[in-house]
């Protein structure tokens, strides 16, 4: 949280440090709610329709009624951006189940609450970005769709947090989670790509990867650049033997990986990563130009 962060709450924009939520909000009590992390550049939101579509899918999956229509939602987002003093930054949009009696029953909550936060976000410094980060394969497995579908971007990230704790304990920056069958899903809050023989591969959503907006954008950029790309089931062997490997996410953008479980990548940052990064930055600049 920074001092300049702004927050839309209860219909008005206020400095984020003044924003308060009820201790009876089920988002706080039970993680009953959903969110999106969104970037803006040049005061323009990057791919807002894709984030809104994913938010709505999460809401439908949890039978959560979004209390604003599309126009009012967009207005609230832009009002928050307007109050934020910088042109570039990060938005966190939350919908919680709202205030209700103690006890988990969502039927006892009168009305979902919407909160929008605009702030700065730097996930990794330039030095790490240039050098690449190290990751472990966590023993924590990604949730399965029959328990809690990982495509719901819910306010409960304990699964990812446990994996991140493993990374902390191992003294590396990030953790990669496998699914129940031992196939690669993604990082703690980032999608993953491997590069082999000039082509890129990323796990399909059906294996437990979130359908990341950045992931989708990178697949598009690869197509533009003529880099073969596919969604493929991957194992730890594919990670250990990759020519290159990188993470993608709204907060992270693209981050190269230099080592996984002590195995060094072929190159880091690799040539394909650098091409995709340049293509990604050019696309963002194009779409958010004034
Ligand atoms: N996986 C998870 C679990 C995430 O939380 C995120 C961040 N939203 C991502 C992947 C990356 O998705 P996106 O590119 O849409 O930010």
Image: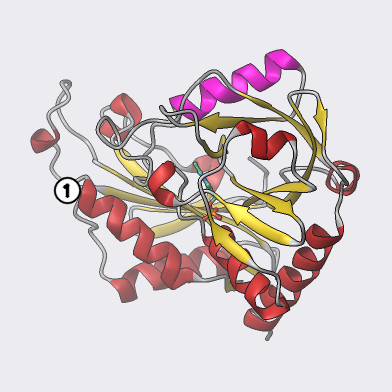
Q: Which residue is rendered at x = 70% and y = 77% of the image?
A: 226
> Farthest residue in the top direction?
169
Name the spot of residue 82 as percent of width and height, x first.
Answer: 57, 70
Q: Which residue is rendered at x = 28% and y = 35% of the image?
A: 32
Task: Tell me the SS state at disc 1.
Answer: loop
Q: Nearer the viewer, residue 168 or 110?
A: 168
Position of residue 165 in the picture relative to residue 141 (left or right): right
Where residue 12 sits, quadrant-wise, is bottom left
Position of residue 132 in the picture relative to residue 119 (left or right): right
Which quadrant is home to the N terminus? top right
Q: Which residue is mark 1?
A: 63
Start-end of magenta stretch: 158-170
Name the spot of residue 271 as percent of width and height, x first.
Answer: 86, 60
Instruction: Report whether residue 250 is seen.
Output: no
Position of residue 231 in the picture relative to residue 224 (left or right): left
* Position above or below: 256 against 39: above
Which quadrant is home to the C terminus? bottom right
Q: Which residue is rendered at x = 83% and y = 42% of the image?
A: 132
Q: Nearer the viewer, residue 120 or 14?
A: 120
Instruction: Report whether residue 181 is seen.
Output: yes
């Amino acid at each position: 949280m920074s001092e300049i962060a702004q927050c839309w709450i209860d219909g008005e924009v206020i400095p984020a440090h003044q924003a308060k939520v009820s201790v009876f909000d089920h988002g706080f009590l039970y993680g009953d709610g959903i969110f999106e992390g969104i970037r803006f550049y040049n005061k323009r939101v990057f791919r807002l329709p894709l984030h809104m579509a994913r938010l709505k899918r999460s809401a439908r999956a949890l039978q959560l009624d979004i209390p604003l229509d599309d126009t009012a939602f967009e207005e609230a987002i832009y009002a928050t951006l307007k109050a934020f003093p910088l042109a570039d930054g990060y938005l966190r949009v939350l919908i919680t189940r709202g205030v209700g009696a103690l006890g988990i029953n969502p039927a006892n909550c009168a009305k979902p609450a919407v909160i929008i936060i605009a702030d700065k976000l730097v996930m990794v410094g330039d030095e790490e970005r240039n050098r690449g980060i190290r990751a472990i394969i966590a023993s924590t497995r990604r949730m399965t769709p029959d328990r809690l579908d990982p495509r719901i971007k819910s306010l409960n990230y304990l699964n990812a947090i446990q994996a991140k704790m493993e990374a902390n304990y191992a003294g590396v920056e990030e953790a990669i989670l496998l699914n129940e069958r031992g196939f690669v899903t993604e990082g703690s809050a980032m999608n993953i790509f491997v590069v082999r023989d000039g082509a890129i591969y990323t796990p399909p959503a059906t294996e437990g990867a979130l359908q990341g907006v950045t992931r989708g954008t990178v697949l598009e950029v690869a197509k533009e650049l003529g880099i073969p790309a596919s969604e493929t089931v991957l194992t730890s062997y594919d990670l250990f033997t990759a020519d290159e490997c990188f993470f993608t996410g709204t907060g992270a953008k693209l981050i190269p990986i230099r080592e996984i479980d002590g195995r060094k990548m072929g190159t880091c940052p690799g040539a394909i990563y650098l091409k995709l990064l340049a293509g990604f930055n050019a696309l963002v600049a194009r779409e958010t130009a004034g």
